[in-house]
């Protein structure tokens, strides 16, 4: 199999995908903008060949690279970065080179939040009320229907960029006077906790791995308020979360694909409301959290699906795993060294966060695990305790 791994150096831990592909016998063809000599040794060893372009946003350069790979190695069988940022570029390349996977004709329902809502409804999963609105008067009418606060965000967007909580008419008017010239969707503000259903499907659309997480804050709040974040994994997935996740996976016809589905768990009724879908792994260190929770290798399981359409065998969620972020701008009670001493037995990983991820994931991250949730959450609160 000839597999082009796109932007293989970012996020830093995703080099493991390339290593796993090579382990299963693929010709791993790297395509990125980082000089070859700057790549980590594990990546260099995984590649059959690496093609550097000057600008990953220059499609002509990408076409040249793909054309070269095709000329030298034959038909390209797979292409991915497992990174949402490149989803549209990858879909275009798959369409142009007839590569299996998400192509341009499917981008609408997996990139546009308004179209996602229609899929959720068709699958029988409740959604937050929302509309694509382009003027103040229509937005005011929507607010009269759902009440303040509302959330305005790009209909197509990554993370929390240009996402705003709007509390009154004055803020609504300011939003329309200053917003970027792109399509925005406005949604009712949901009071609830964010839960995710995350996993991997095989080439037939079967769920071969799944788990779930609970977040203490949404990305919008973390980025806009410059706060830190934490989130932890379930050992036992709530029945309604699994049911909703399975319905959505089936509705989107996912094949050989990671997914990250986000929901609100309503504070009052405790029911679930679908928020959005992402056709990639959860961000940051979450793929490593999969491994720490199950004592397996999700990078290897993904490569096994890509090459052989199977995983190595059954898995079990043995631990709760919690990501705890800290930001250098905050004044924490416990120093980094104190954290290592106090929670060394729980800590399975800690490291600096790559620059582009800092607003959402903090400057530094700790990963804790334990069979019981209580001690893990107590450690999380202590690590993030501020003066």
Image: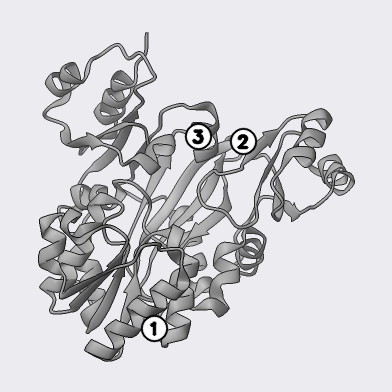
Question: Quick check: 113 above or below 352?
Answer: below
In the image, taking residue 345 as reference, residue 74 lies left or right, namely right
Secondary structure of the residue carrying tag 3 is helix
The answer for how far apart the CA atoms under marks 1 and 3 are is 35 Å
Packing grade of label 2 (10 A; few <14, some 14-19, many >=20) is few
Mark 1 or mark 2: name the one nearer the start of the chain. 1
Q: How is the image coloured?
A: one colour
Secondary structure of the residue carrying tag 1 is loop
Q: Identify the residue under disc 2.
A: 191
Marks 1 and 2: CB-CB under 8 Å?
A: no
Q: Identify the residue under disc 1.
A: 100
Q: Identify the residue under disc 3.
A: 223
Which quadrant is home to the N terminus?
Answer: bottom left
Circle on res. 233: none
Question: Quick check: 181 above or below 46?
Answer: above
Packing grade of label 1 (10 A; few <14, some 14-19, many >=20) is some
Q: Where in the figure is residue 90, as x and y percent of width and height?
A: 43, 71
Packing grade of label 3 (10 A; few <14, some 14-19, many >=20) is many
Q: 16 or 64, which is in the foreground?
A: 64
């Amino acid at each position: 199999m000839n597999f082009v791994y796109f932007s293989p150096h970012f996020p830093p831990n995703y080099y493991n995908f390339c290593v796993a592909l090579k382990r299963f016998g693929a010709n791993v063809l790297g395509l990125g903008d980082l000089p070859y000599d700057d790549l980590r040794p594990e990546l260099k060893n995984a590649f059959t060949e690496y093609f550097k372009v000057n600008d990953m946003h220059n499609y002509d350069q990408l076409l040249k690279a793909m054309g070269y790979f095709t000329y030298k190695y034959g038909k390209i069988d797979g292409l991915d970065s497992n990174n949402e940022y490149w989803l549209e570029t990858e879909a275009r390349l798959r369409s142009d080179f007839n590569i299996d996977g998400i192509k341009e004709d499917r981008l609408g329902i997996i990139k546009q939040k308004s179209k996602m809502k229609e899929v959720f409804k068709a699958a029988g999963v409740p959604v937050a009320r929302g509309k694509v609105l382009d003027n103040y008067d229509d937005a005011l009418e929507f607010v009269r229907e759902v009440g303040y606060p509302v959330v305005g965000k790009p209909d197509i967007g990554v993370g929390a960029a240009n996402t705003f909580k709007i509390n009154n008419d004055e803020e609504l008017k300011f939003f329309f006077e200053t917003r970027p010239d792109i399509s925005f969707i406005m949604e009712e503000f949901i009071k609830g906790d964010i839960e995710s259903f995350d996993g991997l499907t095989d080439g037939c659309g079967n769920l071969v791995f799944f788990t779930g997480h609970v977040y203490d804050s949404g990305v919008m709040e973390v980025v806009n308020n410059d706060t830190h974040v934490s989130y932890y994994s379930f050992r036992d997935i709530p029945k309604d979360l699994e049911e909703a996740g399975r319905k959505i996976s089936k509705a989107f016809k996912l094949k050989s694909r990671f997914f990250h589905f986000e929901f609100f768990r309503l504070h009052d009724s405790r029911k679930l409301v679908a928020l959005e879908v992402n056709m990639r792994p959860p961000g940051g260190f979450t793929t490593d959290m999969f491994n720490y929770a199950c004592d397996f290798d999700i990078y290897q399981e993904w490569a096994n699906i890509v090459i052989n359409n199977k995983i190595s065998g059954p898995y079990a969620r043995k631990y709760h795993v919690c990501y705890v972020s800290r930001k250098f701008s905050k004044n924490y009670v416990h120093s980094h060294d104190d954290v290592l001493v106090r929670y060394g037995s729980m800590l399975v990983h800690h490291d600096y966060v790559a620059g582009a991820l800092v607003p959402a994931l903090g400057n530094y991250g700790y990963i804790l695990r334990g069979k019981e949730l209580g001690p893990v959450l107590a450690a999380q609160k202590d690590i993030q305790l501020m003066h």
